[in-house]
């Protein structure tokens, strides 16, 4: 399928606000999906296949013996603590979170991806500054 056609389909989905569009043209098929606020796409198979097996060297590092569990970034991108500039952060230090609670957004390839907690507990530390680039596997939060 021609890249111009694909770009037009993406623009159509974004402009109209529809959740999903699937087009078949002979043997070719493309599906464009847009996630509404409050939902999460989660990492795709290809993203998890490309994820490093160990945390990057330039990511935040906890002191040896620091209590808690580090919530890693599922992908590389730009870290945002709130849904929009000037709005309240999803979580602050001291907040209690459950598995599945939204912790932050990572902007990757012009897509806003909500990051949900893999752990239940209390936010002990935010390891990344708002608006800063992060690598896949870098620590985002320390959860007790």
Image (cartoon, helix red, strand yellow):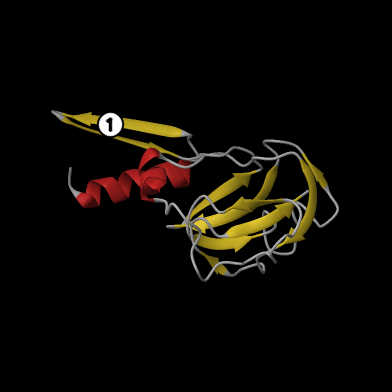
Decide if residue 144 is on the left or right side of residue 14. right
The residue lying at 42 percent from left, 51 percent from top is 51
Relative image position of residue 19 (x, y in whole percent): 48, 34
Say which of 87 and 102 sits in front.
102
Count residues near mark 1 (Cα–Cα under 10 Å), then give few for <14, some for 14-19, many for 20+. Answer: few
In the picture, residue 37 is in which quadrant? top right
In the picture, residue 99 is in which quadrant? top right
Image quadrant in which the N terminus is located: top left
In the picture, residue 59 is in which quadrant? bottom right
* Dot 1: element: strand
The residue lying at 59 percent from left, 61 percent from top is 79
Relative image position of residue 29 (x, y in whole percent): 23, 32
Q: Residue furthest front?
A: 65
Q: Which residue is mark 1?
A: 23
Can residue 95 be seen from the camera position used here? yes
The residue lying at 37 percent from left, 33 percent from top is 21
* 35, above or below 108, in the image: above
Say which of 140 and 63 sits in front.
63
Say which of 107 and 66 sits in front.
66
Q: Residue furthest right?
A: 94
Say which of 93 and 10 sits in front.
93
Relative image position of residue 123 (x, y in whole percent): 78, 52
């Amino acid at each position: 399928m021609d890249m111009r056609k694909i770009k037009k389909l993406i623009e159509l989905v974004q402009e109209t606000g529809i959740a999903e569009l699937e087009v078949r043209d002979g043997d070719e098929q493309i599906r464009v999906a847009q996630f509404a606020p409050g939902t999460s796409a989660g990492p795709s198979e290809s993203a998890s296949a490309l994820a490093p097996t160990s945390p990057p060297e330039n990511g935040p590092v906890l002191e040896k013996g620091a209590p808690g569990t580090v919530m890693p970034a599922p992908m590389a991108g730009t870290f945002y603590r709130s849904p929009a500039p000037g709005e309240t952060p999803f979580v602050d230090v001291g907040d209690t979170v459950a598995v599945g609670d939204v912790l932050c957004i990572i902007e990757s390839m012009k897509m806003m991806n909500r990051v949900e907690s893999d752990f239940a507990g209390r936010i002990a530390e935010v390891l990344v500054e708002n608006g800063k680039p992060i690598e896949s596997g870098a620590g985002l939060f320390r959860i007790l």
